Amino acid sequence: MHTSRLVFLCNVSLVILSIGGLCLTSSIFDFIVSSRLYYTVPDHKVLINPLLALWLFPSSTLSFILSFSTILFLTAGQKIVDFAVDHQFVLSFFHAILMCCSCILSSFVSFLCAQNAADIGVYAAHASPPQFQQASSWYFSRLRALVVVSAAQSILNAVIISVLYLGINCKYRTFVQISNHDEKITIPDLVEKRTTTYFA
């Protein structure tokens, strides 16, 4: 598979996973969890800390912004492309840093969700009253889904980093190579010039 197509598919997958992650996170941090009303009796141990949202929401949001903006860049105007060509080192540097942060953050969120799901799993299997068990099963299933989603986000971000910045699959062409292309450009070359980018 050509590198540009691989990166594009990874970005599309990241957009879908990020939206799914945001939806799952919103369903977990409802009024009950946000108000610290999901706790055990009689020790009043809060099972899902509302502060966990400070990790979950930024993780999916950052992943969505990076991947969606990269896809939008494919349809950018010529002025934006020229700006990216002139400042490709700076843009690539910050893109790589943000991608690494997103990859690490997604891995950490996956670990936090797995840890929290393990704590809730006991109550999801057997607890009383039945309403508490049903609520535990609700949160448990969504936390497990977030483990998978966050892990997938981390893997896809790692793939993009490896392809773009670690030299894997060297068929990829940079802005400089495109801008130094022969002046005799055919129509297919114009299409390729507009759709092949440094980090998309």
Image (cartoon, rainbow, N blue to C red):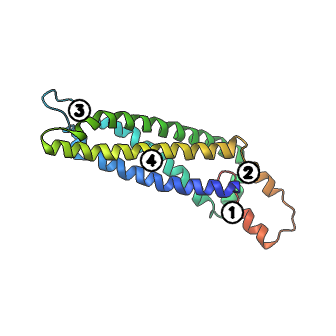
Q: Measure how far apart labels 4 and 1 are at the Cα level.
A: 29 Å
Q: Name the residue under label 1.
A: 195
Q: Sort mark 2 into few (<14), some (14-19) or many (20+) by Cα contacts within 10 Å.
A: few
- Whole-number angstrom distance, CA of label 3 to CA of label 4: 24 Å
Which residue has dot 4 on it? 149
Q: Where 53 sits versus 72, above or below? A: above
Residue ID at (19%, 35%):
39
Q: Nearer the viewer, residue 144 or 196?
A: 144
Local crowd size for mark 1, using a 10 Å CA cut-off: few (<14), some (14–19), many (≥20): some
Quarter of the image that includes the C terminus: bottom right
Could you tell which of marks 3 and 4 lies nearer the N-terminus? 3
Q: Residue at x 67, y 46 (%)?
A: 163
Rendered location of residue 103, percent (x, y): 54, 40
Q: Is residue 175 left or right of residue 70?
A: right
User: Residue 98 at what x, y percent from top left?
Assistant: 57, 41
Three-letter residue code for mark 2: Asp
Q: Is residue 89 visible?
A: yes
Q: Nearer the viewer, mark 3 or mark 4?
A: 4
Estimate the x, y position of residue 118 in percent, counting from the top left. 33, 34
Q: Distance between the residues labelled 3 and 1?
A: 50 Å
- Residue 8 pos. (x, y %): 61, 57
| Residue at image point 38% right, 47% down | 145
